[in-house]
Image: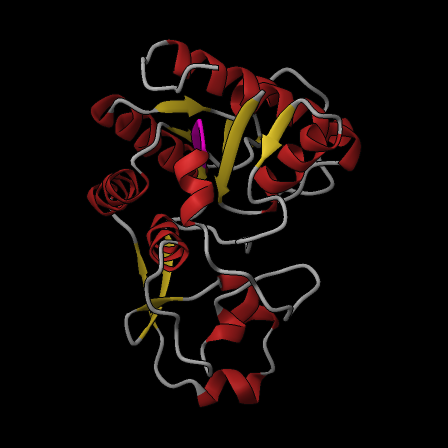
Amino acid sequence: MLKIFALGSCRIHRPLRALDKVNRIAFLNRKDPKWFFHTSRAAVQACEMCLGGDLPPAAQQPVIFETQPMGRVIDMDGRDLIARADVVVLEVSSLKSFDLDGWELNQFKLVKADPVFRDSLGPIEVTDHSAEDVKSHIRRVQELVQRPILLVDHIHIERDGAPIPKRLLLSRILAEASSELGLGMFSTRSILQDRNPAACLQNGFHYQPSFEPAVGEAILEAATAHLATLDTRDPV
């Protein structure tokens, strides 16, 4: 049974949890350390915290940690879990970076935050990560976890017969990172392109719960295929 540690949003956590529930995988951080994020820099930040690094200031934590239920206390120690993982599934779903005093913030939490609280945080620097930024962040995650990695992109959606340009750009960047760094890659286009969007998606950001097991199986298949090209797994 494949042991998986996930870094990303609910778009990978929920499909992997669906597989864990039926014993198709061992989802190592199904409970903790778990919070949702969207950028490659946030993935580096999460890895550093899971491996014993500093936590953000208390005032910033409400706009960094996206959990279910919101605001719960997270068991941050992921050192043993990462060491045990056969593969780390790393989803990057945004190039948009929100920086406050060197900490990567969660855009969803910022949007939902009370405006008075948001203004009290101080100046937030908003930029777009470049292709080289993303590749550098992924390389840093690779150095930190020392495990095989499967990259996952954002939900593939077409409008007027063409993919959303920013999502297409991100997918191409991740494909380049996969090739250059020797990582696995799962593109959601492979499972969504020929399907009825209404049957698969709640909206442009979330899968239908009934479709999440299929996404999980596709991620598992891609991870297994990637591992088959390597010789790094411990003997069963």
146 relative to 130, above or below: above
* Numbered range of the magenta stretch: 85-89
Residue 166 visible, this angle: no
Q: Choose between 214 and 54: the one closer to the eye.
A: 54
Q: Residue furthest front?
A: 236
User: Does the magenta run of residues contain 86?
Assistant: yes
90 horizontally vs 175: left or right: right
Query: Looking at the image, which residue is at 69% across and 43% down?
Result: 203
**Residue 187 placement (x, y as % from top left):** 47, 24
User: Does the magenta run of residues contain 210?
Assistant: no
**Residue 236 placement (x, y as % from top left):** 48, 15
**Residue 42 placement (x, y as % from top left):** 38, 55
Query: Looking at the image, which residue is at 68% across and 28% down?
Result: 19
Determine which quarter of the picture holds residue 159.
Answer: top right
Q: Choose between 58 and 156: the one closer to the eye.
A: 58
Determine which quarter of the picture holds residue 144.
Answer: top left
Determine which quarter of the picture holds residue 134.
Answer: top left
Query: Looking at the image, which residue is at 54% across and 31% down?
Result: 156
141 horizontally vs 59: left or right: left
Query: Looking at the image, which residue is at 48% across and 67% down?
Result: 64
Q: Choose between 101 and 46: the one closer to the eye.
A: 46
104 horizontally vs 189: left or right: left
User: The N terminus appears in which quarter of the rendering?
Assistant: top right
